[in-house]
Amino acid sequence: MNKNMLDIYTDFLICSTSYTIATVLSCATGNAISHDSVTRFLSAEDFAPSDLWQFAKPCFTNC
């Protein structure tokens, strides 16, 4: 698993107020990350909501 891409993607999901699609993430990064690379990352593994929660949970424990 690409931890850097996971970090970017989860930050994107957490702060997004609009559509959470690969093309929007690509646009938000100034096309530094292509929408194809986001799609490949998401297709590489079978992610579940619990995977995202395990990554995001530490952000909420300090509130």
Image (cartoon, rainbow, N blue to C red):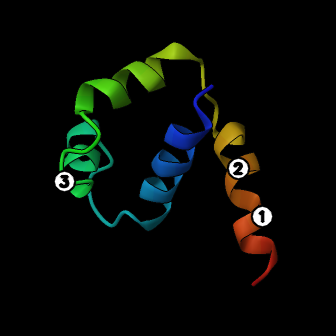
**Do callouts 1 and 2 mark residues in contact (Cβ within 8 Å)?**
yes
Please name which of the two marks, 3 or 1, marks the residue nearer to the observer.
3
Marks 3 and 1 sit apart, C-alpha to C-alpha, by 28 Å
Q: Name the residue under label 1.
A: 58
Q: Which amino acid does label 2 sit on?
A: Phe
Q: Which amino acid does label 1 sit on?
A: Pro
Marks 1 and 2 sit apart, C-alpha to C-alpha, by 7 Å
Residue with the most extreme front position: 32
User: Residue 30, which numbered label?
Assistant: 3
Q: Earlier in the sequence, mark 3 or mark 1?
A: 3
Q: Mark 2 points at which residue?
A: 55
Marks 2 and 3 sit apart, C-alpha to C-alpha, by 24 Å
Q: Indicate the secondary structure of the residue bearing disc 3.
A: loop
Where residue 29 sits: x, y (%)? 27, 53
Where residue 41 sits: x, y (%)? 45, 24
Q: Which residue is drawn at 29% across and 39% down?
A: 33
Where residue 14 sits: x, y (%)? 50, 62
- State which quarter of the image contains the C terminus: bottom right
